[in-house]
Image: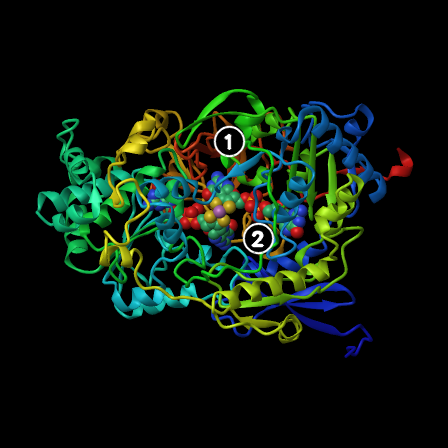
Amino acid sequence: MADGEGRAPVTVHPTHAHWGSYQVLVRDGTVVGVRPDPADPAPSPVIRNTPVAQHHATRVARPAVRRRWLESGPGPDDRRGHPDDEYVAVDWETALDLLAAELDRVRREHGGTAVYGGSYGWASAGRLHHSQGQLHRFLNTIGGYTRSRATYSHAAVEVLFPHVVGPRGGYELLRRPPTWRAIAEHTDLLVSFGGLRVSNMWTASGGRAAHTAEPDLRAAAGRGVRMVSVSPLRDDTPADVAAEWLPISPGTDTAVLLALIHTLFADGLADTGFLARYTVGADELRDYVMGDVDGVPKSPEWAAELSGLPADGLRDLARRMAAGRTLVNVGWSVQRARYGEQPLWAGLALAACLGQIGLPGGGFATGYGSMGSYGGGATPEGLPTFPQGRNPVDSVIPVARVTDMLLNPGAPFDFDGRRLRYPDIRLVYWSGGNPFHHHQDLNRLSRAFGRPETVVVHETHWTATARHADIVLPSTTALERDDFTAGQGDLRLRAMPRVVAPHGEARDEYDVFSELAARMGVGAEFTEGRTSAEWLVHLYEEWRGRLRAAGTEVPPPFEEFWAAGSIPIPGRVEDSALFGDFRADPDGCPLGTPSGRIELYSATIAGFGYPDCPGRPTWLDPEERLGSPRSRTWPLLLVANQPTGRLHSQQDMGEHSRSEKIADRAPIRMHPADAAARGLADGDVVRVANDRGSCLAGVRTSTDLRPGVVQLATGAWFDPSGAPGLSCVHGNPNVLTPDAGTSALSHGSTGQLALVEVERFEGTPPPVRVFDPPRITPAAER
Ligand SMILES: Nc1nc2c(c(=O)[nH]1)N[C@H]1C(S)=C(S)[C@@H](COP(=O)(O)OP(=O)(O)OC[C@H]3O[C@@H](n4cnc5c(=O)[nH]c(N)nc54)[C@H](O)[C@@H]3O)O[C@H]1N2
Ligand SMILES: Nc1nc2c(c(=O)[nH]1)N[C@H]1C(S)=C(S)[C@@H](COP(=O)(O)OP(=O)(O)OC[C@H]3O[C@@H](n4cnc5c(=O)[nH]c(N)nc54)[C@H](O)[C@@H]3O)O[C@H]1N2
Ligand SMILES: [Mo]
């Protein structure tokens, strides 16, 4: 109905994102507001970002080509990403002709290996229009590409655990841990390294029909589960839930875990029966922990020096862990640091010494508090999935080695027992990710992006990554197309009907790739003759067929699902024990490790001979920690964790995200004592710096941090438009973080921790310019 002023009526539309299901209010084709889904028990405030982001000036409205590339042709160019660089708007025909010809040139002259199509990133929810799936299928169809392996989230989990609990065990650790309800029922003590961060549980890949994790966490606490939060930030776990806060010095979890093991052995509390029956390497572990190997007992006193946690408290904690049903959780953040494999392996070893692996609500897990889906059940029969085809090119890098790859073509490197070489990349293709959000040492990444001959980016918005591209193609947002979504372990499959018309000339990736494929002579292979509407039905029906074959309850036909808006996902399971079958019958259900058991010592890993990842859990002293030699120059330890204002860098211009900023800058939290020592107060604009770069940020003091630790979450759009010597005026912590892998085993990202110094910024801070679009000339004026 029109309102009294004769304006068009507001309509209400359900939609679904990685941050949850919600309703979008639309008037006259414009998103004017949002409302939480009335059925969501714990909606995320992040939904408030959508109205501004959907129609923001930084939306990519038309295809655009960098003027220098257009005029000089492909080639290395150090000016990529320069804030004053200029683009020329072109029509779709021109853009697609240029791109098809360039892709064809590169594949003919250099082969598919020369195309980097890893394109890591979260993009938007949706089973069909998921950017990576679209791009990978397209690149496979035209001859293949260099791909990336594993994730920024938990690469060390993905590479280490197949060695120590077997491939299936590694998969189940991520996908089928005890549910929150099993914890409520069975667990006495949940000790979480990295806390149980409620804002992180807003998020799940593909979203979740309802935010169940926080209510389930509170219910578990209400039923008497005691929670110990080992973390530099008090508010990583809600105050009413955390029984105790152990304010650990970041980067020292392995020392603490080894000390807990030390106490179990020293007090005769280690479950030697379990160790003998279910593990190999317990003697090696014991000798190392007790100091027989290097003369250093890994005692609570030893760990207290490193971690800043009192030795008596650690000893007491180990005894309490042995006294009841205990679940050890190592959050993903803890492995996103140098030697990140070690706290995972040490956490598993601690749980093995407690002898509770395979018991309901006990043992080891990795991911509570990191993702809303973790502990929310599993969907073992899978979800409808867009097929990506086969990549004929056998060229791969660990995902976080992208800068190394671009800077060092041909250089050898070690990775999970293999010796590989970096390919010589001529064309970088990104769709649905923002490396200038997610990668470390952004100044180095920016130099690396100067090396390829061509950079192609599909984006909804003019991110810093789009501003490093030669060809930028405008993508629809999830609100502008028909799709459906569900996350791992989700409760319901949910339709995502289009809410508004595409912005400007934005197109669905599927349509763009269909046209490119046609130009390159493989149109029919890419589309298989289907429109995107037909693909939706096809994916759904194929999934139905799979469920039918598995003997699971069969969901209704597509039309019924689409009309209903959502349907329950059949075949969900809610487990209470991980490794329960192995515990019941270790010989009949061995793990897929060489020994068939849990490997506390791995001859395979030892055989790789990596100094940064030996054959058993080991304390290796990282550079980026308080008290290290490097900390004499850069005395504060920055925690660069996930933002509360948004998902990563997405919708950073939105209302909720901007409401957290201080003087337009990302907030940096500091202990009042650290602020006072530098003459700083709340609201001050500061320069955060180390030898890799510097950024501006706004001070917020808080006693919720361990002194010496400062916190600047990720996701402020990288803005290099300030004065020389200032890498980012907006507050992106990745100008400060180290571009080093966890180890040669998994090469995971180490973006969580970086030593820095903080000082007042004198004078008027340069304005944030990244929320203005770049300079774009209409084609006619070229
Ligand atoms: N320092 C530090 N760095 C970190 C981390 C950390 O802990 N510390 N965490 C890391 C982790 S765990 C992760 S997962 C990464 C996340 O890094 P990313 O996943 O790269 O971050 P996003 O901001 O989600 O990037 C997604 C991009 O896709 C775009 N997009 C959305 N929908 C579409 C679409 O339909 N089509 C196209 N073409 N584009 C679309 C968005 O505009 C956005 O720019 O960051 C990592 N970086
Ligand atoms: N709102 C929101 N939710 C998200 C995301 C988002 O961008 N926004 N991103 C999602 C993604 S892709 C992922 S992978 C997950 C990541 O999930 P996590 O990796 O668990 O998340 P973080 O927020 O990076 O880290 C959690 C906490 O670990 C603590 N920590 C840091 N270093 C150490 C350490 O050395 N030792 C200990 N004990 N604690 C430490 C920090 O205080 C930090 O707040 O989050 C997901 N959830
Ligand atoms: Mo992640």
**In this view, 364 is above or below 341:** below
| Quarter in which the C terminus is drawn | top right
Q: Nearer the viewer, mark 1 or mark 2?
A: 1
**In this view, 511 is above or below 243:** above
Element type where label 1 sits in the image? helix
Q: Residue placed at 57% from the left, 53% from the top?
A: 657
Q: Residue placed at 75% from the left, 28% from the top?
A: 105
**Residue 598 occupies quadrant:** top left
Residue 567 horizontal/vertical position (percent): 56, 72
Q: Earlier in the sequence, mark 1 or mark 2?
A: 1
Q: Which mark is residue 657?
A: 2
**In this view, 514 is above or below 407:** below
Residue 366 horizontal/vertical position (percent): 36, 50
| Quarter in which the N terminus is drawn | bottom right
Residue at the far right: name it.
780
Which of the pair 511/454 is nearer the observer? 511
**Residue 521 occupies quadrant:** top right
Which of the pair 325/10 is nearer the observer? 325
User: What is the C-alpha distance between the residues marked 1 and 2?
Assistant: 29 Å
Which of the pair 257/529 is nearer the observer? 529
